[in-house]
Amino acid sequence: MSDILIHTEAGVLTITLNRPERKNSITRAMYTAMADALAGADSDPAIKVVVVQGHETIFSAGNDIGDFLSRPPAGGESPAARFLQGIATFSKPLLAAVCGPAVGVGTTMLLHCDLVYAGDNAAFSTPFVNLGLCPEAASSLLIPQMMGYHRAAEALLLGEPFMAEAALEIGLVNRVVPPTEANGVAQAIARKLAAKPGSSLIETKRLMKKGQMHLVLQQMAEEGASFARLLREPAAKEAFGAFMEKRKPDFTRV
């Protein structure tokens, strides 16, 4: 069975992360499948809305570490970069249903969604510093805007999880529901949007986003360059080595 499921019905394209046995950790192939699905949906007039969802127990643990280390992202043409650029520039309404852990890109991709519905078991985290890395997906720009600087510093520098109610308070999610209902709620809202004039939806989203789209893409590019540099440095090597060896990292010598 595919790790990414694509389903279209009544103008709604649904992208389902379908690798729960590996905590929906994302591989290069999965990034490629999602980037392709977004590009296709953006150019298909029959698609009015896209929903990204996971399992009721897990949204995504972030990158698949083994896959990530075997072929680290390099430059703006990597599958991960294609996906992030695609989700940032997607012209139509983009919804997400999030339950359980949403780690790293599992959280930062939500910054580019228009509506997010969370299960009350959702836990969001951005542990980039803990891995010797830096934020991505323009999260170093968007999280401070959303949370305020001090809460953003707590999220990005400490990398500790925050739960669904806190995400609701800061505006990262629109509604918190039982985990068994999150995907259904997102689908119901998507169908409601799909019944509206597509051109009006696209233009309204464009007007809301246009003021900082250039800044978002610029920040994403700068983050990507820093991320690639840090990935080659001793701190990241120690962090990932410790992860693979199932031990606590020691940053005293880096």
Image: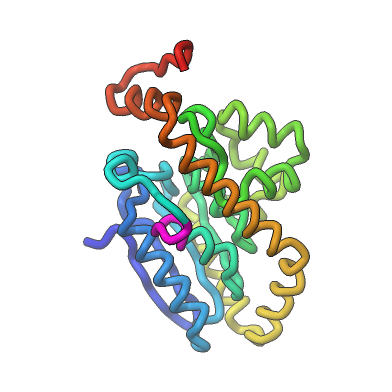
Residue 242, image x and y in percent?
A: 34, 22
Q: Position of residue 47 (x, y in %)?
A: 50, 82
Q: Quadrant of residue 167?
A: top right
Q: Is residue 209 left or right of residue 182?
A: right
Using residue 63 as the reference point, say whether residue 113 is left or right of it.
right
User: At x 40% / y 52%, what residue is drawn?
Assistant: 55
Q: Is residue 131 above or below residue 105?
A: above
Q: Is residue 160 above or below residue 225?
A: above
Please determine whether, in this image, residue 74 is positioned above or below residue 4.
above
Q: Work out which quarter of the rendered image holds the N terminus and state it.
A: bottom left
Residue 97 visible? The answer is yes
Q: Which residues are magenta?
A: 76-82
- Residue 42 image offset from top left, x and y in percent: 52, 78
Identify which residue is drawn at 36% across, 29% down: 240
In-image side of 34 versus 43 (left or right): left
Q: Position of residue 108 (x, y in %)?
A: 56, 48
